[in-house]
Image (cartoon, rainbow, N blue to C red):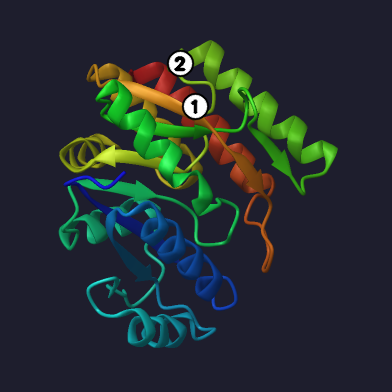
Amino acid sequence: MADNNKYTVLLPTYEERKNLPLIVWLLVKTFSESGFDFEIIVIDDGSPDGTLDVAKELQRIYGENRIVLRPREKKLGLGTAYIHGIKHATGNFIFIMDADLSHHPKFIPEFIKKQKDGNLDVVTGTRYVGSGGVFGWDVKRKCISRGANYLTQVLLRPGVSDLTGSFRLYRKPVLEKLINSCVSKGYVFQMEMMVRARQFGYSIGEVPISFVDRVYGESKLGGSEIIGFLKGVLYLFATT
């Protein structure tokens, strides 16, 4: 199922020392078995736990053409990590996903097939349709997630079932345009990307994925994030 496309995976990392070897191994395995050309760009934001040292060792194992390191001095946020990563991307398609193993690379061939079948601009993973789901969350978190998603559906009508997910495939120029048009930070940034995509008339497809809560490390969703999320939704509602 090989093709002429090259796929760049942007992996922003912060304190992912334990997860990085496994996610990279799974990515290399998935792409190699599928026959797709790929590169993985690791954008580490000055992790104090030695994530960058691990990334250097992985680069030594898999080669500089497969593992590209583009670290930054300190934590500067997701949106700027993608901007930073895109500058160095040589693929014409770009995957964004989390490095903490909540997104399994096994879904990547399905994203690629979906994109090809519909000649789509964006393919996004959804936890809320078909075989998609969330594992490892308690009832409270599931309720918050569902409620947040429902709220955004009602207010923003984005045309996709899962707005806060961050496992996606973009055409490179589409991602560049979307990132440059976004003003949000954090969780709301992922949401705004889809709202803008609909605004610009880009074609969007969805692939059901199972989302697994962090294997190692702390999840970053707390009360202040929820308040920020709500403010962000209302901001987008008012401005799009």
- In percent of width and height, residue 103 lies at 55, 50
Three-letter amino acid code of the residue under disc 1: Val
Query: Residue at image x 33%, y 18%?
Result: 240
Q: Would you name the residue on which mark 2 appears?
A: 156
Q: Secondary structure at mark 1?
A: helix
- In percent of width and height, residue 230 lies at 57, 30
Q: Which is nearer the eye, 35 or 98?
A: 35
Q: Are marks 1 and 2 in contact (CB under 8 Å)?
A: yes
Quick one: quadrant of the N terminus?
top left
Q: Which is nearer the eye, 84 or 8?
A: 8
In the rendered image, the vertical position of residue 85 relative to residue 222, given as above or below: below
In the rendered image, the vertical position of residue 84 relative to residue 142, given as above or below: below
- In percent of width and height, residue 58 lies at 41, 81
Which numbered disc, 1 or 2, marks the residue that appears first in the sequence?
Answer: 2
Query: Residue at image x 49%, y 55%?
Result: 98
- In percent of width and height, residue 213 lies at 69, 52
Disc 1: CA contacts within 10 A as few (<14), some (14-19) or many (>=20):
many
Three-letter amino acid code of the residue under disc 2: Leu
Q: Would you name the residue on which mark 1 appears?
A: 233
Q: Secondary structure at mark 2?
A: helix
Front disc: 1 or 2: 2
Task: Find the distance from the CA under tag 1 to the CA under tag 2.
Answer: 8 Å
Which residue in the rendered view is the most extreme toward the right?
139
Q: Quadrant of residue 100?
A: bottom right
Query: Residue at image x 20%, y 43%?
Result: 172
In the rendered image, the vertical position of residue 122 relative to residue 14, given as above or below: above
